[in-house]
Image (spheres, helix red, strand yellow):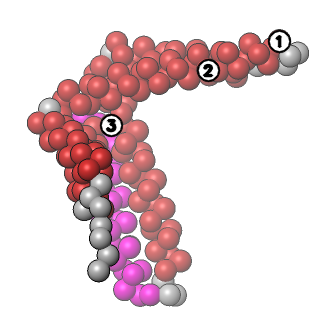
Amino acid sequence: MEHRHINWFGILSGVVFIIFAFMIFSQPLETIISLSYIFGILAWIQAITSTVSAVRANQAGIPISGWRMFSIAFDILVGFVFIFHLGLGIGTIGFLFAIWFILDSVSGLYFARILNPVSRGAYWVTMVFGLISLVLGIILLFSPLMAATVLVYMIAFYLIVFGVSLIAASL
C-alpha cells in the first residue's frame, strides 16, 4: 500500500480560498468596489508601461504615433473613471462582463454547429445552454449592476470550487 503525505500548504491554501469566497458572499458591494479600484490601478499601470515603452522607442528613433498617445491618454482616463467615479466604474465592469458573456455564448453556439455531425445529444445540450446564456447575456447587458453582481458571485463560487479542489488534491 502506498503511503501518501498530506500537503498541509495545499489544504491551507484551499481553506484561504474558501474563506475569501465567503467574505465575497458576505460583502458583494465592497468586492465590486475593490474590483473597480483594481481595474483603475491596472489601467494606470498600463499607461505607465506604454509611456515608458514609447519613450524608449522614441529614443531609438521610432516616433510616437498619435494612436499610441491616444491609447495612453485613454488608459489614464479609464483609471480615473474606475477609481474616482465608482458608479460608472462598476457599471463599466458589468457592461464588459455582459459583453464577454454574450461573446462566449455566441462562441458556444458556433461550437455546437461543429458538434452536430459528431453527437446529436451534445449538439442539442450545447445549443440549449448557448441560447440560454445568450439571453442571459443580453439581459445583463441592459442591467450592468446586475451583471456586476453576477460577476462577484461567480468569482466567489469559483473560489469555493478551487478551494475544495485544492483541499481534495492535498489529502
Q: Is residue 80 above or below residue 122?
A: above
* Quadrant containing the C terminus in the rendered view: bottom left
For marks 3 and 1 on the same chain, the one whose residue lies earlier in the sequence: 1
Q: Nearer the viewer, mark 3 or mark 1?
A: 1
Could you tell me the amino acid type at mark 1?
A: Gln
Using the image, tell me which numbered label, if any, was put on residue 59: 1
Using the image, tell me which numbered label, if any, was put on residue 49: 2
Q: Position of residue 148 (x, y in %)?
A: 27, 37
Q: Nearer the viewer, residue 19 or 13?
A: 13
Please give the name of the residue rendered at 50% of the width and 87% of the height, measured from the top-left corner: 118
For marks 1 and 2 on the same chain, the one whose residue lies earlier in the sequence: 2
Quarter of the view holding residue 63: top right
Could you tell me the amino acid type at mark 3?
A: Gly
Question: Where are the magenta residues, as a range?
Answer: 119-147
Identify the residue under disc 3.
94
- Structural distance between the alpha carbons of marks 3 and 1: 40 Å
Q: Nearer the viewer, residue 49 or 100?
A: 49
* Quadrant containing the N terminus in the rendered view: bottom left
Please give the name of the residue rendered at 29% of the width and 61% of the height, measured from the top-left corner: 5
For marks 3 and 2 on the same chain, the one whose residue lies earlier in the sequence: 2
Q: Is residue 81 above or below residue 154?
A: above
Q: Is residue 11 above or below residue 87?
A: below
Q: Position of residue 27 (x, y in %)?
A: 14, 32
